[in-house]
Amino acid sequence: MLSFVISVIALFVGYALYSRVAERIFGPDDRETPAIRKGGSTDIANCQMLCKTHNRSKGNK
């Protein structure tokens, strides 16, 4: 029983730590998109799902 309780506690601690790391790495980018900034369309056909690193590397084209 003790090993079960320790395992559950370790699971919750691991989840808490991993979620903070994952949020920092894969978190949403809250910057305004060029389509909105330049008055363009926000149609679903223009959507590109990129991680924060690749989205920032595209620049303002």
Image: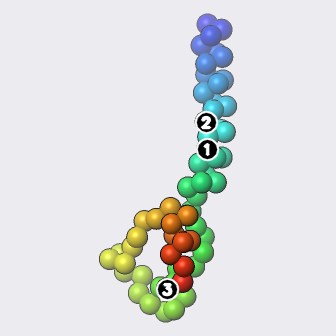
Q: Which mark is residue 61?
A: 3
Type of residue at label 2? Tyr
Image point (37%, 78%), residue name: 46
Type of residue at label 3? Lys
Image point (46%, 65%), residue name: 50
Q: In x, y percent, where is residue 45?
A: 32, 77
Q: In x, y percent, where is residue 54?
A: 51, 66
Q: In x, y percent, where is residue 25?
A: 60, 54
Q: Which mark is residue 15?
A: 2
Query: What residue did someone put label 1 on?
Result: 19
Q: In this view, does 42 lie to the left or right of 12?
A: left
Label 1, label 3: how many angstroms apart (C-alpha)?
A: 33 Å
In the image, residue 1 sits, relative to residue 24, either above or below, namely above
Q: Which is more foreground, mark 1 or mark 3?
A: 3
Answer few, some or many: residues within 10 Å of disc 2's Cα (few below 14, many 20 plus, some between 14 and 19).
few
Asked if labels 1 and 2 touch by Cβ distance under 8 angstroms, the answer is: yes
